[in-house]
């Protein structure tokens, strides 16, 4: 029923008539027929949770308000009668309303708007009101305004929250895409359009396959979509492409969204551009490789005088063998092979030994990409002991190989493994030894032991223990810090590098003091059986 079809009787007479608020809207002649209808209307108004109010057209004073006013605005009905709605509008809304209400409400007769209204306690609440102008049927004169208002706070808060979310989605630097269940692109945010160079193309011409590289699309279709359809979260590092030449590495999170009735509505894809992170990681790795390489050069530099001595020995031996041959056979016209065979083999073996030492130094100092392979520990340790033999002798330390189990194999980069072991062995030698000019053959030299075993978790544990003074208490927490050293000419890089190399192999490096004195540095690496695939 349209209330406006009723004639207005006398609004001012019914200002406080709360029992029959709508009786003025009907002709006196209709009263009998409409008495019941008026009663029902009045009852509906009284019962409604929406607030029904009548206002004077000039200044919107309340002529009538239904009891819902108490719940909505905190006023008793009597209190609000006579107040002008303009007094209660939020200052930011009143001007707008004043500007718009004459054109909308008075000309078209029906006007819905949402605004903030002051409650009795001074707080503002959002109301949504539909206002209708009531006119004299004969003269067309505006008599009063009838308004139905309801609480719109919840709707406005939800709308504002949605708008905030939408703004965040649009402005975030993450690439946000919505995909329909048949994998068509329904929305790309600004970042996605710009990064994937898709601003010229309409969304409805795109599907998911256009956004990713072929390999990444396959991964997403084969793993991501089935997972999210089962309600599991799915996240992966993939490559997006769009209209670009070069793919962009992204961390992509995929979600499936369902309707209230459990129907798949759309997928959302939120991708974080990893280009910069990847670049920084690559630079860090390059930098780390440089440091590792420099540290190997330093280690070889430290061993240089010893290595020169090591090389000098076979070279001298070769010279001696050749001089012997010259002395013995120099004046003979004919030489029997059986006589030459032995000294020549000696020359060749000794030259090979010198050659292999040079080869090892070259390998150790060469700059190369890490390459992991199966390594038998019992092969590596003797070579390293030989490598630092001269230094050990200079410090009057015996380096002992206790790795007897030839089945102990690890999967590692050979050079890096040697670098870790060599750092620990050099530290052990320096910690245990004393440099003395006197060559006391009877003195018992301290030992640096290299050992290896399987630990309780089935990992290979390699230890280098020494008979030095052990690790001082104030040094323990800082051992693995870069540039931490207690040695006058130390660099403080050896343990820091060893620590990061062990971790990059998935192992751990730690130090402890031995009960019998001295320190023991141990690290773990994954055990690999020689006959097994890794
Ligand atoms: P550097 O040898 O150049 O000092 P490292 O990183 O190898 O650098 O060692 C850092 C510090 O750790 C050493 O200066 C020393 O104080 C301590 N340290 C290392 N190995 C041992 C050890 N076997 N016994 C006692 N202290 C040690």
Image (cartoon, rainbow, N blue to C red):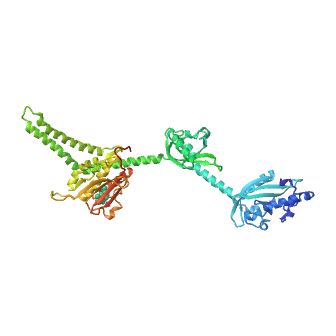
Nearer to me, 255 or 17 = 255
Is residue 414 in sight in this rendering?
Answer: no
Nearer to me, 235 or 91 = 235
Residue pushed farthest right?
29
Left or right of 109 on screen, residue 33: right
In this rendering, the answer to whether 278 lies above or below 17 is above
Q: Position of residue 474 (x, y in %)?
A: 33, 64
Left or right of 37 on screen, residue 471: left
Left or right of 258 on screen, residue 13: right
Is residue 399 in sight in this rendering?
Answer: yes
In this rendering, the answer to whether 133 lies above or below 178 is below
Q: Quadrant of ligand 1?
A: bottom left
Residue at 32 percent across and 64 percent down: it is 473
Residue pushed farthest left?
331
Q: Position of residue 171 (x, y in %)?
A: 57, 49
Residue at 10 percent across and 33 percent down: it is 336
């Amino acid at each position: 029923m349209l209330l406006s079809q009723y004639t207005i009787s006398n609004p001012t007479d019914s200002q406080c008539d709360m029992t029959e608020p709508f009786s003025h809207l009907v002709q006196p002649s209709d009263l009998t027929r409409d008495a019941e209808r008026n009663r029902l209307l009045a009852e509906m108004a009284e019962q409604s949770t929406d607030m029904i109010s009548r206002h004077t057209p000039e200044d919107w004073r309340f002529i009538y308000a239904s009891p819902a006013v108490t719940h909505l605005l905190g006023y008793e009905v009597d209190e609000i009668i006579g107040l002008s709605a303009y007094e209660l509008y939020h200052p930011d809304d009143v001007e707008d309303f004043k500007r718009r209400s004459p054109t909308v409400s008075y000309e078209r007769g029906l006007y819905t708007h949402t605004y903030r209204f002051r409650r009795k306690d001074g707080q503002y609440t959002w109301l949504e009101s539909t206002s209708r102008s009531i006119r004299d049927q004969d003269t067309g004169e505006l008599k009063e305004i009838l308004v139905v208002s309801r609480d719109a706070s919840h709707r406005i808060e939800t709308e504002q929250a949605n708008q905030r979310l939408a703004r965040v989605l649009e402005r975030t630097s993450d690439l946000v895409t919505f995909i329909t269940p048949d994998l068509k692109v329904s929305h790309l945010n600004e970042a996605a359009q710009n990064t994937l160079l898709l601003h010229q193309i309409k969304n409805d011409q795109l599907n998911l396959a256009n956004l990713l590289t072929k390999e990444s699309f396959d991964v997403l279709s084969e793993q991501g979509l089935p997972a999210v359809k089962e309600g599991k979260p799915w996240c992966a590092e993939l490559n997006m492409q769009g209209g670009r030449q070069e793919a962009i590495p992204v961390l992509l999170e995929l979600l499936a969204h369902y309707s209230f009735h459990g129907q798949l509505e759309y997928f959302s894809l939120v991708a974080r551009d990893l280009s910069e992170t990847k670049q920084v990681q690559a630079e860090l790795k390059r930098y780390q490789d440089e440091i590792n390489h420099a540290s190997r050069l330093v280690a070889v530099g430290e061993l240089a005088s010893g290595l020169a001595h090591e090389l000098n020995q076979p070279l001298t031996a070769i010279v001696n063998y050749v001089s012997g041959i010259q002395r013995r056979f120099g004046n003979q016209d004919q030489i029997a092979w059986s006589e030459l065979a032995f000294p020549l083999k000696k020359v060749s073996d000794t030259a090979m030994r010198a050659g292999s030492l040079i080869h090892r130094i070259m390998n150790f100092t060469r700059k190369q990409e890490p390459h992991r392979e199966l390594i038998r520990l019992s092969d590596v340790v003797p070579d390293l002991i030989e490598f630092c033999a001269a230094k050990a002798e200079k410090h009057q330390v015996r380096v002992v190989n206790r790795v007897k189990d030839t089945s102990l194999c690890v999967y590692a980069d050979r050079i890096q493994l040697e670098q870790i072991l060599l750092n620990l062995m050099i530290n052990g030698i320096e910690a245990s030894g004393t440099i003395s000019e006197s060559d006391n053959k009877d003195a018992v030299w301290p030992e640096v032991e290299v050992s290896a075993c399987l630990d309780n978790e089935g990992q290979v544990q390699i230890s280098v223990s020494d008979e030095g003074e052990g690790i001082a208490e104030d040094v323990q927490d800082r051992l693995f810090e870069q540039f931490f050293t207690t040695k006058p000419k130390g660099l403080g890089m050896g343990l820091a590098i060893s620590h990061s190399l062990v971790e990059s192999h998935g192992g751990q490096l730690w130090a402890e003091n031995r009960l019998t004195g001295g320190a023991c540095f141990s690290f773990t690496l994954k055990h690999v059986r020689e006959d097994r695939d890794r």
